[in-house]
Amino acid sequence: MTQTDRSHFGWANRAMGGVAFLKGDITWSPVHRERSQTSGSLSEGSGKKRKQQGVPRMKQQGPEPQTSDDKEPCTKRVKPVAKTLSASGLSSAKVTPLKRLSQSIQRSISFKTEPRPPGYVPPPRAGGCRRRSSKLWSETFDRVSEELSAREVKRQEVIFELMQGEQQLVADLNLVKKNYYEPMLTLAILPEAELREIFGTLDSLAPLHEDLLGRLLGLRQEDGTVPELGPTLLDWLPGLRAYESYCCHQVWAKARLDSRKREPAVGEFLRLCQESAFSRKLELWSFLDLPRSRLVKYPLLLREVLRQTPPDHPDQAPLQRAVALAQDLVGLINRKTGEAECRYYQQRLSYPDGAPRHPGIDRSSLLLCHGDLRNSKGQRLHVFLFQEALALTRPVLQGEQVVFQLQGPPLPIGQLEVQDLPDGGARLGGALRERGAACGSAAGPRPTRCRRSTPSTSSSG
């Protein structure tokens, strides 16, 4: 080694904190320092490893003479080897030789790992929540979408949305059974009879939507397009009548669930489920209400498919009949659900002792709307607007059920004036918000005001 090499070697030695890397047969050579207590153990452990591996060592030639340029001032602080090694990404000298050998092997393996193939997708972590795909049809089948017209692309987008909705609903229905119903039954959190009352006929809806999903996937061609949809829907849509019993029972199921959630065991189980990844932070009732919200989307989706279908398309006539059938079925189920809700609240009305039941309420087959409001005295009341009467009530808890005590005699509908309020009018006193879900309104709830009509108001029309 020449004097120039020694000079460079001394500079690299100081820069690396006492470790010099050279080419050739020498892997590394420590520089002994009396102040560093770790370099000795590092050299000793590494020397044993080199003897086992048969790596030749450089002969000790004594300390090298230092030039004036290599001398360090006595006031300069010497950085410990352990800190320098950790800063340069090497292992600390305090670790055992066996652990250092393991780390070296792991680094060598990681350096030799082959690159991932282009289509590699890492597997999902155990217990994690699977993110749902939000890709459009044109993004999934981009090569085909470039060859189609803009109208046909929109048509395929709606059909693709219909498929994705069915797939997600089937997954959620199976999730409810696996993560809610079966654990609550196995752990005896609730009796089986009460579980059937809460979950209703939910188990019978999964095969219905699995059938539609299988049919839609069978219609899809290799390029991702679905030529005709109408005939398949005409054959499948009558099965939606199974929703009648499920939706009509929801008002009783919701009341039973709200009552049982007050119990510590039930409330704790539902809380843990909601905090788990599989629930997406949704409550149990949000999952139980998913089928109803899916039901009202069918007329909207099919109407949009029809709008994007050309008049001369062979799917035009079957789609028209499918849209009409879907609207009739959803309207029928909404009407039956409204009647069931009306009967439920009729049974929950509590009359004062000795007061007869109001005939107008008992004759009503539909509950137009209900909600909370405050009277002029600041008291909170729950108001029911039936077909023939308006009832002012106050909710109270009797045993395990919530009943509604009448606050005065019900008012006949002929003595009331119902006024629709503009946007923002719900902040006015006496406003009542109509429940759009119960009435099947796609526009959502709207604020209304009910007041007793006076003779002058009635005469003015």
Image: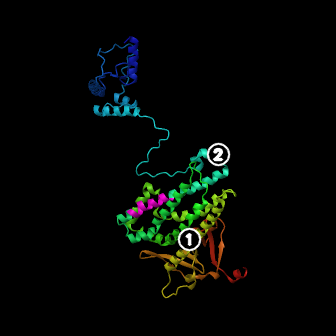
Residue 385 visible in rendering: yes
Q: Quadrant of the N terminus?
A: top left
- Label 2 element class: loop
Residue 126 vertical placement versus 65 (above, below): below
Image: magenta residue range? 169-182
State whether residue 150 is above or below residue 303. Answer: above
Snapshot quadrant of residue 12: top left
Q: Which residue is mark 2?
A: 147
Image coloring type:
rainbow
Against 242, residue 155 (above or below) is: above
Residue in the picture at 59% in, 82% down: 411
Nearest the eye: 234 or 120 = 234
Task: Say above or below: 161 vs 50.
Answer: below
Q: Considering the whole magenta stretch, tell me its main secondary structure.
A: helix
Q: Nearer the viewer, mark 1 or mark 2?
A: 2
Residue under the point 53% across and 71% down: 244
Residue beneath disc 1: 333
Q: Amino acid at mark 2?
A: Glu
Q: Position of residue 165 (x, y in %)?
A: 54, 57
Residue 276: x, y in percent?
42, 56
Quarter of the image for residue 76 reads top left
Q: Tell me the residue at 38%/62% (across/down).
A: 183
**179 magenta-colored:** yes
Q: Tell which of 79 and 228 is nearer to you.
A: 228
Q: Which mark is residue 160?
A: none
Give how far across and how far down residue 256 sits, in percent: 44, 71
Circle 2 residues within 10 Å: few <14, some 14–19, many ≥20:
few
Is 417 colored magenta in this rendering? no
Q: Earlier in the sequence, mark 1 or mark 2?
A: 2
Q: CA distance from mark 1 to mark 2?
A: 41 Å
Which quadrant of the figure has residue 312?
Answer: bottom right
